[in-house]
Amino acid sequence: MKNTGGRQERGRVLVRPDLLVRLEGFAALAFAAWWYGAHRGSWVIFAVLFLAPDIAMLGYLWGPRVGAAVYNLVHTYTTVGAVIALGFVTDHRLFVYLALILAAHIGLDRLLGFGLKYPSGFKDTHLQRL
């Protein structure tokens, strides 16, 4: 505990949203990778597709507004949920595997401090200015 002018500061992590988001990212990455392995997903496919979501950065070729929209659409857990639901509804494991790879990718991004983008520019994220 840190002494701040006579009073003890408790629960410092709980008042540091940047650390909490990074911890969430680690948890998402770890859980998605564990689930993927537990359900016998191919680690070769995982490795090949792990960085594929960053292809969404190509949206910036059409400007920062389109770029942010495309990037955010791919890099949100809402998309992960939709793809998992598609996998369950269609009974195709491939969609579930793809969603888990995407969740792991997003988790790593959050762990590293990369967030969703604002249309003002690629470096303006919901977590920080890069």
Image (tube, rainbow, N blue to C red):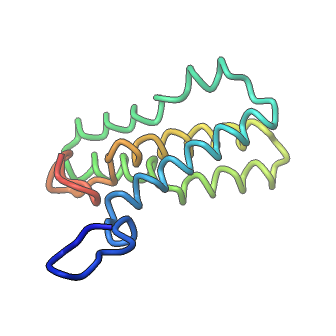
Q: Is residue 20 above or below residue 98?
A: below
Is residue 85 depicted above or below 3 in this figure? above
Q: Of all residues shown, which one is farthest toward the top?
A: 44
Quarter occupied by the C terminus: top left
Q: Nearer the viewer, residue 35 or 75?
A: 35
Q: Residue 124 or 74: which is nearer the viewer?
A: 124
Residue drawn 54% across the image and 60% down it: 78
Image point 68% across, 22% down: which residue?
43
Quadrant where the N terminus is found in the figure: bottom left
The relative height of residue 79 versus residue 30 in the rendered view (above or below) is below
Q: Give x and y (percent) for residue 42.
A: 73, 23
For this view, does 103 lie left or right of residue 110? right
Q: Residue at x 79, y 39 (%)?
A: 93
Measuring from the top left, give residue 27's x and y in whole percent.
56, 51
Provide residue 65's location: percent of width, then percent of height: 22, 53
Along the horizontal axis of the image, is 32 left or right of 6? right
Percent across and percent down for residue 40 are 81, 30
Specify whether 9 is left or right of 75.
left
